[in-house]
Amino acid sequence: MKLHQKAGRIPSEDTILVLAFMLDQGDLQEAYDSPYRLDLIYRLYTQNGEIQDTEALKASIQQYVENVDILLKKAAKNEPIRIYMETSPADVSGYIFVCHLLDPYDIGLHLIEVPQVLHNPNYTTFFPSLENILYQHVDYLLSLDKEVPYYDVNYYSMIWESIRNENSALRAIVNGQIMSVSDDIYDVMILNRFEKSKLEVQAIGEIIGIYQQKLNDYFLADRIQKLIEKDQLTVLEDHEHPYNRLLIRTN
């Protein structure tokens, strides 16, 4: 997005903020800036053991918290706010969380919902995330901008409060709606990929590509580790980077 901004395709005066709090997972009674939440994000990012500069990562995570402060200052000035949202549990959870943050300011916002399917008549149909659709299709994305009035912001703020009070271990998209669910809801889907021995990274890629659940690899890797600990998956060949382990479903 910043490259597009430098190229003049996104207004230079726009402030680009990331709020990647992974709110589809974990205890919502803990604040977004609590040590619990920040440690959860850090653990999920580092679980494969490939990140060398952990201090830079910690600074990036702390920037999420500072970005909330920037957002609220702009809301207080009634500056226009546009959210780019995928239809993933993490993004939808983040969206209703932001609505909760903005609710006291009595303002609406603009929303660009990244389509799950992008039809290209020249060659194929693919299922993009924001990062892989943005580079070639920023103009198309901007055409999807829709206004979200304050009463909708208020509605989603109430949804957030309801989800937070339920405080399940996980949030998922069920019939198009964000819902509190058990943290093992995807375990059968994961186990089915390991009927034959397979590298963890291969199974993660298959789950994301085949089931189109818009799940991130951090979450899937975390669930795979828990299934190993429950002896439902067996490690045939270990590796210093867990994504490269060879696994099979335990008989």
Image: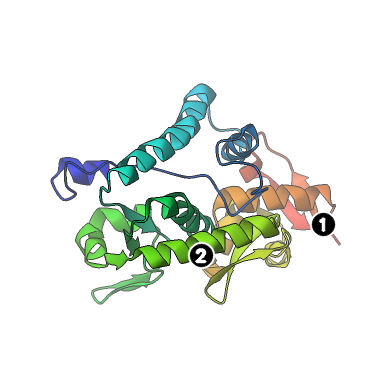
Q: Position of residue 168 (x, y in %)?
A: 70, 57
Q: Residue 201: x and y, percent?
A: 59, 50
In the image, what residue occupies the spot 36% across and 42% down?
Answer: 71
Mark 2 neighbour class, 10 Å CA radius: few under 14, some 14 to 19, many 20 or more: some
116 relative position to 196: left or right: left
Compared with 186, 119 (above or below) is: below
The residue labelled by disc 1 is: 232
* Quadrant including the C terminus: bottom right
Q: Mark 2: which secondary structure?
A: helix
Are the two marked residues, 1 and 2, in contact with CB atoms closer than 8 angstroms?
Answer: no
Residue 233 or residue 64, whichever sits in front: 64
Q: Residue at x 34, y 56 (%)?
A: 107
From the image, tell me which residue sits under label 2.
209
- The correct choice, above or below, for 6 with respect to 207 in the image is above
Please name the amino acid that badge 1 sits on: Gln
Give the mark nearest the N terminus, 1 or 2: 2
**Residue at the image position 37 percent from the left and 68 percent from the top:** 115
